[in-house]
Amino acid sequence: MAETKKAVKAVSAEETKEIDFGELELKIAKPTLNSDKTILVSGNFTELGKNIQKVVDRYKGTVLTEDNVDYVKTLKKQFVSLRTGIERERKEYKKVYIDPAENLLKSMCDELLRIVDEGEKALGDQLDEYDQRRKDELTEVLNDYVKDAISKYQLREEYAAQIQLKKEYYNKTQKEEDSIDDINAQAEELSRKQKEYDAGVALIQAECEGTGFVPDTYIRELQYKSSMEILLEIKADKKAREEMKSKLDAGEKVTIGEPLEEELAKAESFNSKEEKETLRERVLRVRYKPEQAKLMADFFKKNSIQFEFIKTDF
């Protein structure tokens, strides 16, 4: 503590009167351009910095007394004013020189970029049009290959429409023969599916022949069932009809409402909307008088039940 006191000295009122701080105001000159195209910003930065440093060095570490405390308070106010003056000069310089130059530069560059964008878009549109023409011409060629494949594999319209012109066909690196091979591969697979469908139709028609069953009722199921599943279904329907006919011939009363009641019980347990709205298809045999035909048709229509009348007898 004793050593610290020795290192610190007080400043008397007489000493403060002898201090000359010089100019304490920042002045920045108009910017100029150097020969190397760099901007020169000049002013009294160095002189002002030296004067401020002189004050700082003089009063840093001093002990205030009754003689110098008022002067130091005044000096501190000068520092506050100095900071305010420096900030004001910096903002004024920016307002007068930097902002206008920046705004002008931005405006000029924006105009140049507008012209560049216009040119870039125009060239891009031309390239897009060129590429589209190339694709259109290639599409004509590919469609000829599709027609050849349809003819080769004898595809019907519904299967021929499933052949796709894939995205990779239009790549510039795509080889024409690879596209042809792929189109033929598609056609071959569709031909297999067509033959499977036709075979299924033939089996269903043969199974329904002489039964009074309408083949189309079962053929529609080929969209989501295999032909084997449908054939088993037809056999089951045949068996059920024969059992019913035997009961009727024996004079027994036949009730056909039970499957619908079971279906209703299932429907009440369904949770999802999809389950509830799934369509079921059943083949019913209904006995009615001629005058009841309209009544029955009105009932189905009123309740939005899809139906078709099939002329058949036991």
Image (cartoon, grey):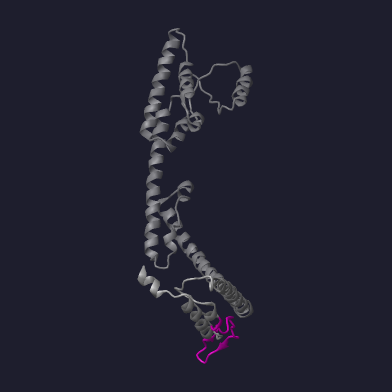
18 vs 236: above or below: below
Instruction: Name the residue nearer the viewer: 156 or 124.
Output: 124
In terms of secondary structure, what is the magenta stretch mainly?
loop
State whether residue 118 appears in this view: no
236 vs 57: above or below: above
Residue 183 x, y percent position in the rendering: 40, 56
Q: Which residues are magenta?
A: 17-40
Residue appearing at x 39%, y 75% in the figure: 7
Instruction: Name the residue nearer the viewer: 191 or 20.
Output: 20
Instruction: State left or right for residue 231 relative to residue 50.
Output: left
Residue 95 x, y percent position in the rendering: 63, 76
Instruction: Name the residue nearer the viewer: 205 or 253.
Output: 253
52 vs 293: above or below: below
The N terminus lies in quadrant:
bottom left
Location of residue 111 (image quadrant): bottom right
261 vs 225: above or below: above
State whether residue 241 appears in this view: yes
